[in-house]
Image (cartoon, helix red, strand yellow):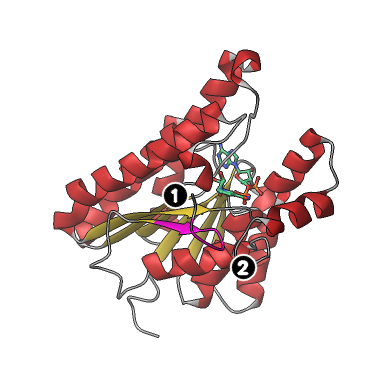
Amino acid sequence: MSTTERRVAVVTGAARGIGAATAVRLAEQGRAVAVLDLSERDCDETVARITDAGGRALAVGCDVSDAGRVEAAVARIATELGPPLILVNNAGVLRDNLLFRMDEADWDTVMNVHLRGAFLMSRACQTHMVEARFGRIVSLSSSSALGNRGQANYATAKAGLQGFTKTLAKELGPFGITANAVAPGFIVTDMTARTAARLGVGFAELQESAAENIPVRRVGRPADVAGAIAFFTGEDAGFVSGQVLYVAGGPLD
Ligand code: NAI
């Protein structure tokens, strides 16, 4: 394995769902992976999946919206694994509600985790990337960025991440750093399971009705998104930057 494949990747929100699948996928490519989530213990399962397969991983507990904790977490990753040159801003939460029922906490929580979190993590990691003259930043947007009923907060944050991505691509490009966004449609995870519970419908039923409106006639799996992230973080994707890739089983209206 070459030294470039052994580069260190940080995946936020990697205890479960898309983040866990991405951490495992990047480890399969030879990356050493910092598996970061709110609780360090919650990261153990993803870390075990990687280390059991012969890979290298570190569990890191950190709230991505907390500047001090982010700085400390990235410093620890740099010391224990090596300089983080690949960053996947995946941590996310939902606080869905129609506008007239959405309170300030619903708005602020979503902005803080998605936008402030991606900002803090990218700012902390770019120091290492600039020094190495290599970096890959991928942020999770969403098909909701195009507008979605009941998600004024989330749609705004996910659209914001697209502007953030394009700006990082321009600012950091001269240092060999790319920034791209992956925008999934319906993916089967705890997040969409919670949406089903909130709507009062069975998860299987929600998946079936969602699949009817998706051209490939199925809902997505975390591995579908991990594959796209693996491409953007790859060694040979250095000329692909500032892009938003919808991973949604078809084009979006
Ligand atoms: P999930 O709810 O299964 O996992 C999200 C993870 O983020 C959890 O492990 C959670 O603990 C962690 N997290 C939340 N707040 C955090 C914080 N402040 N600091 C650190 N970690 C934190 O969600 P899922 O479905 O895997 O989503 C991953 C990303 O993909 C999110 O950004 C989500 O918005 C986005 N996405 C998901 C879609 C889906 O259909 N599941 C569709 C489009 C985008």
Which residue is pictured at 46% across the width and 31% down the height?
156
Image location (x, y in percent) of residue 226? 53, 65
Per the image, the residue denoted by label 1 is 76
Say what secondary structure mark 1 lies in: helix
- Foreground residue among 53 and 215: 215
Question: Is 146 placed above or below 53 here?
Answer: above
Alpha-carbon span between mark 1 and mark 2: 42 Å
Q: Is residue 167 magenta?
A: no
Image location (x, y in percent) of residue 220? 63, 61
Image location (x, y in percent) of residue 249? 56, 63
Residue 233 can be seen in this image: no
Which residue is pictured at 54% across the width and 22% down the height?
107
Query: Which numbered disc covers residue 217?
Result: none
Name which residue type carries label 1: Arg
Per the image, the residue denoted by label 2 is 216
Residue 7 can be seen in this image: yes
Q: Are marks 1 and 2 in contact (CB under 8 Å)?
A: no
Which residue is pictured at 53% across the width and 33% down the height?
154
Q: Quadrant of the rendered structure where residue 237 is? A: bottom left
Q: Where the N terminus falls, by quadrant?
A: bottom left
Which residue is pictured at 40% across the width and 74% down the height?
6
Image location (x, y in percent) of residue 23? 55, 63
For the residue carrying disc 2, how many other residues have a C-alpha within 10 Å: few (<14), some (14-19), or many (20+)?
few
Name which residue type carries label 2: Val
Which residue ends up furthest to the left in the rendered image? 174
Of pointers 1 and 2, the one earlier in the residue sequence = 1
Look at the numbered disc 1 and say if its residue's Cβ is closer than 8 Å to ligand 1: no
Residue range corresponding to the magenta coloring: 245-251
Say what secondary structure mark 2 lies in: loop
